[in-house]
Image: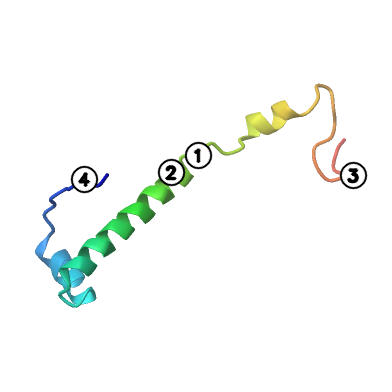
């Protein structure tokens, strides 16, 4: 289901978009849709939980000295 959203662009941004899409309004709409999707996907990826030091350390066995490559422990 598509929903509409009316936005107002700065004159300079609109001019650049118009030149980029060669005055084709449909191409302008598609360009904006793709740009928004890409931006939202990037933000979703950056907000995904990453392995932190705490989670890395909690995965190991208590009292274990396996800290990585062989020979790097104590």
Identified at 61% across, 37% down, the residue is: 51
**Split into 4 quadrants, where in the image is the C terminus?**
top right
Among the two numbered marks 2 and 3 on one chain, the one whose residue lies closer to the N terminus:
2
Among the two numbered marks 4 and 2 on one chain, the one whose residue lies closer to the N terminus:
4
In the picture of the structure, the residue carrying the numbered disc 1 is 48
Between marks 4 and 2 in the image, the one whose residue lies nearer the viewer: 4
Picture quadrant of residue 30: bottom left
Across and down, in percent, residue 47 comes to 46, 40
Q: Which mark is residue 71?
A: 3
Label 3: element kind: loop
Across and down, in percent, residue 43 comes to 40, 46
In the picture of the structure, the residue carrying the numbered disc 4 is 3
Mark 4 neighbour class, 10 Å CA radius: few under 14, some 14 to 19, many 20 or more: few
9 vs 65: above or below: below
Across and down, in percent, residue 57 comes to 71, 30
Check the image and tell me how it is coloured.
rainbow
Mark 3 neighbour class, 10 Å CA radius: few under 14, some 14 to 19, many 20 or more: few
61 vs 30: above or below: above
Q: Is residue 71 left or right of residue 58?
A: right
**Gap in Å between the C-alphas at discs 4 and 1?**
27 Å
Among the two numbered marks 3 and 4 on one chain, the one whose residue lies closer to the N terminus:
4
Decide: marks 3, 4 in contact (CB < 8 A)? no
In the picture of the structure, the residue carrying the numbered disc 2 is 44
Most extreme residue toward the front is 1
**Gap in Å between the C-alphas at discs 2 and 1?**
6 Å
The front one of 38 and 62 is 38
**Gap in Å between the C-alphas at discs 3 and 4?**
59 Å
Mark 2 neighbour class, 10 Å CA radius: few under 14, some 14 to 19, many 20 or more: few
**Gap in Å between the C-alphas at discs 4 and 2?**
21 Å
The front one of 52 and 23 is 23
């Amino acid at each position: 289901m598509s929903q509409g959203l009316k936005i107002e662009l700065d004159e300079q941004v609109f001019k650049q978009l118009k030149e980029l899409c060669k005055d084709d309004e449909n191409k302008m709409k598609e360009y904006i849709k793709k740009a928004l999707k890409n931006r939202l996907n990037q933000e979703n990826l950056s907000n995904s939980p990453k392995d932190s030091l705490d989670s890395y350390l909690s995965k190991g066995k208590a009292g274990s000295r396996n800290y990585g490559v062989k020979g790097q422990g104590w």
